Image (spheres, grey):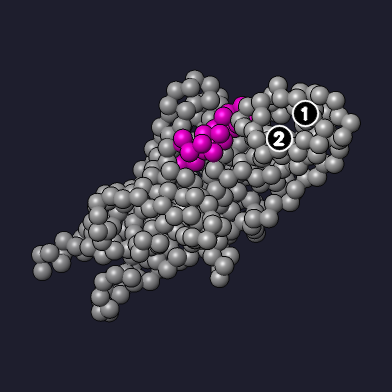
């Protein structure tokens, strides 16, 4: 049998963000011609060094093991020349995660899951120059993970999704393998509830709407993404509704049906309403309003109040892996976004009274 650990072709962006529903190939195995019929969980346990049968069964139950392109159950019996792929919802890595003491804003915790309210500016996952000081380093310390055999697992077994470095809000973490597999499948099936609050440039024409557009990398800038129509992108759907209109900006709630990299940022930019102060997608300059110096100074002050893209992951909802009950956790808007909203409210009010 030929076993090769596949190197993934996609790159990290500067935030380390990945698609929530994306599955990454960790192993590709071709069964020998002389292989006798054998249950796939036993087969993989015997042929993958360091893999326990329990973890193999978890991956199979989560729909992460494919034979000839189809997800199989644990009682599937491998046959000669079967093509087996193990697809997991996180990338392979080759570096250690060192536990680091960190103050964590924990909004929910039990024996299986943890929900953290991440501040803006904190990188979620090591990578691309951020190998320490990340949320994952802090979680490794908080959960008491040691640098033993678990460090070779390449993921510490806890993260099931990510958000941008400069996006604040709720993150769902699994505390054991069973919870990780169960939650990862919900992300893959688009059944996780995710509500974001965004502040975008311009006055939305409608009170609500849906953006549907495949997302792929911008060929002119590998750190940007865009809506593409050539079949190379990944299906993405964002539902939105207006929360408050503030003249030259609008506060909107965005609900993700899918979870692609930069999805809200890309979709809002695609419909002509980039996120306020989103430097990657052009929101860090005046896009609506006048060119008078007093207004420019006002906007510059707003950029200082909110020195990042105006995006907050407010609600995460999921089916609990043990109780099978619906859990919903919400975090309030951070002070920089509320300060920006208040400043624009005062601006709009002063214009009406002048």
In the image, farthest residue toward the left:
353
Vertical position of residue 107 compared to residue 19: above or below: above
Along the line of sight, which residue is nearer the eye, 346 or 212?
Answer: 212
Image position, residue 235 (x, y; %): 49, 50
Range of magenta residues: 170-192
Along the line of sight, which residue is nearer the eye, 35 or 173?
Answer: 35
Q: Is 347 placed left or right of 267 in the picture? A: left
Q: Is 200 placed left or right of 62 in the picture? A: left
The first of marks 2 and 1 along the sequence is 2
In the image, farthest residue toward the right:
34
Q: Quadrant of the C terminus?
A: bottom left
The residue sitting at 57% across, 29% down in the picture is 182
Disc 2, SS: strand
Is residue 142 visible to the viewer in this orientation of the structure?
no
Disc 1, SS: strand
Vertical position of residue 166 compared to residue 169: above or below: below
Image position, residue 103 (x, y; %): 53, 42
Image position, residue 236 (x, y; %): 46, 50
Q: Is 171 placed left or right of 207 in the picture? A: right
The residue sitting at 82% across, 32% down in the picture is 80
Q: CA distance from mark 2 to mark 1?
A: 8 Å
Residue occupied by mark 2: 67
Give the total of numbered labels: 2
Q: Quadrant of residue 302?
A: bottom left
Q: Quadrant of residue 36?
A: top right
The residue sitting at 40% across, 66% down in the picture is 283
Q: Residues within 10 Å of mark 2 (few under 14, many from 20)?
A: some
Image position, residue 231 (x, y; %): 54, 57
**Marks 2 & 1, CB-CB < 8 Å contact:** yes
Magenta-drawn stretch contains 84: no
Task: Indicate which disc residue 78 carries.
Answer: 1
Q: Quadrant of residue 170?
A: top left
């Amino acid at each position: 049998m030929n076993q090769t650990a596949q190197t993934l072709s996609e790159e990290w962006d500067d935030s380390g963000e990945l698609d929530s529903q994306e599955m990454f190939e960790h192993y590709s195995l071709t069964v020998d011609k002389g292989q006798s019929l054998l249950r796939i969980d036993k087969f993989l346990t015997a042929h993958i060094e360091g893999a326990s049968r329990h973890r193999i069964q978890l991956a199979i139950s989560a729909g992460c093991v494919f034979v000839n392109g189809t997800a199989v159950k644990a009682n599937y019996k491998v046959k000669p020349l079967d093509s087996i792929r193990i697809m997991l919802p996180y990338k392979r890595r080759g570096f250690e995660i060192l536990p680091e003491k960190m103050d964590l804003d924990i909004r929910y915790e039990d024996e299986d899951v943890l929900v953290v309210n991440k501040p803006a500016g904190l990188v979620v996952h090591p990578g691309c120059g951020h190998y320490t000081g990340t949320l994952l380093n802090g979680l490794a310390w908080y959960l008491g993970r040691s640098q033993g055999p678990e460090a070779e697992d390449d993921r510490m077994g806890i993260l099931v999704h990510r958000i941008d470095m400069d996006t604040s809000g709720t993150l769902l973490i699994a505390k054991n393998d069973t919870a990780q597999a169960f939650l990862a499948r919900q992300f893959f099936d688009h059944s996780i509830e995710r509500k974001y609050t965004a502040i975008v440039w311009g006055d939305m024409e409608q009170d609500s709407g849906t953006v549907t557009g495949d997302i792929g990398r911008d060929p002119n800038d590998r750190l940007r993404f865009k809506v593409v129509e050539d079949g190379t992108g990944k299906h993405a759907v964002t539902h939105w509704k207006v929360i408050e209109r503030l003249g030259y900006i609008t506060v909107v709630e965005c609900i993700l049906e899918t979870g692609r990299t930069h999805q809200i940022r890309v979709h809002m930019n695609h419909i002509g309403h980039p996120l306020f102060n989103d430097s990657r997608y052009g929101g860090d300059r005046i896009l609506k309003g006048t060119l008078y110096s007093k207004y420019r100074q006002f906007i510059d002050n707003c950029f200082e109040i909110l020195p990042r893209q105006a995006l907050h992951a407010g609600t995460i909802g999921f089916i609990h892996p043990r109780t099978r009950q619906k859990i919903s956790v919400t975090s309030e808007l951070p002070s920089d976004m509320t300060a920006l909203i208040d400043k624009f409210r005062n601006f709009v009010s002063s214009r009406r009274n002048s």
